[in-house]
Structures are given as C-alpha cells and as structure tokens.
Amino acid sequence: MFKIGLGYDVHRLVPDRKLILGGVEIPHELGLLGHSDADVLIHALIDALLGALALGDIGLHFPDTDPQYKGADSRALLRHVFSMVIEQGFRIGNLDATICAERPKLKDYIVRMRRNIATDLGCDIGDISVKATTEEGLGISGAEQGMSATCIVLLYKV
C-alpha cells in the first residue's frame, strides 16, 4: 500500500533571525519569522507526512500558542512526526521538495539539507530531492518578503 502527501509552508523574512532551511543555518541578513526556528522546508515536509497519513497539519500537532515549541528545532519535530509514520507501519519511498527564495542562492547547501532529511527519516539520500527556485522578482519571495516550500512524499507500507 502507498500513501502520498503534499505539504506547503511560507514564512516572512525579517532581520535579527537565523535563516535555517533543511536544518542548515545559512548566512543571510534576514531570517524566517516563526514560533519555532521557522524552517520552511522542514515544515512543508512535516505537513506532507501528516497529510499522507490524514493526521492533520503541523499547527494541530505543534501549535504556535504552546510555549514548549517556542524556538523549537524543526528537525526534532520532524523526527517526532516520522515516529508516527513508523508506528503506522510506513517508510519513505521518496520525497521531492522545492524551496522558493530570491536570495540567497541555495545550491551550496542543498546536499547538506538532503543529508539532514535522509538522516531524520532513516532513508537513503537518493530518496530525497530538494530543489531551489526563484519567482523571478515576483510574489512574496521575489520581493524578498518571505520564502516558501512545497513538498510531496510517497510512503509505502512495510
């Protein structure tokens, strides 16, 4: 049996915050605003996993009104959600994600993001695709007001 999930997330860019994508801290004058570390890529992945299992979304499991998640490491949240995937008898088939950001250029960080995600999901890095694109100066990422990420994941029953 297979299950497919789709996740999407967006966060505003602001000064005085770290920019963390896929668990990698990236030097930049702006960071993503959020209750946790605001890792937009990991948040989209979490929503994809939860969606595949029909378990709601990230806000249901880790509400921004709960102080225990303030500044939370999104990779820790991902590992928690992945334990739910395992409990239901599923594993990662593959995932494909796209980050939408005008700046900074992300190509030098993609392999580290893929490696982090593969480690957290107990799968091969070859099953993890992370890409980056721009909006050619359009939209929230084009105007450098924020970044977004989309992720699709295929789960298979063990």
Image (cartoon, rainbow, N blue to C red):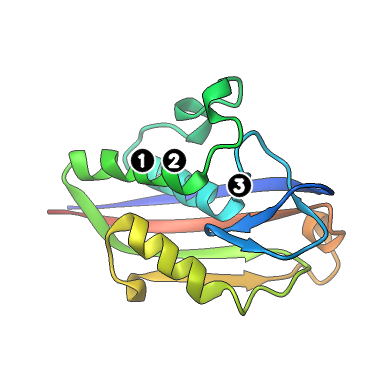
Q: Residue furthest left?
A: 158
Quadrant in the picture for residue 81: top left
Q: Which mark is residue 103?
A: none
Q: Residue at x 73, y 42 (%)?
A: 33
Give SS at disc 3: strand
Q: Amino acid at mark 2?
A: Leu
The residue at the point 23 percent across, 55 percent down is: 91
Above or below, 95 relative to 1: below
Q: Is residue 81 left or right of residue 110?
A: left
Q: Which of pointers 3 and 2 indicates the residue nearer the eye?
A: 2
State which quadrant residue 108 falls in: bottom right
Whichever of labels 3 and 2 marks the residue nearer the N terminus, that label is 3
Label 1 and label 3: CA atoms lie apart by 16 Å
Question: Relative to the observer, which residue lies in front, 58 or 119?
Answer: 119
Residue that carries the numbered disc 3 in the rendered image: 9
Q: Amino acid at mark 3?
A: Asp
* Label disc, if present, on residue 81 of the rendered structure: 1
Question: Dot 2 corresponds to which residue?
Answer: 77
Say whether residue 94 is left or right of residue 101.
left
Q: CA distance from mark 2 to mark 1?
A: 6 Å
Instruction: State which mark lies toward you, 2 or 1.
Output: 2
Whether label 2 touches label 1, CB < 8 Å: yes
Going from N to C along the chain, the mark reached first, 1 or 3, is: 3
Give the alpha-carbon distance from disc 3 to disc 2, as whole Å.
15 Å
Where residue 126 appears, as percent x and y from the top left, is 34, 76
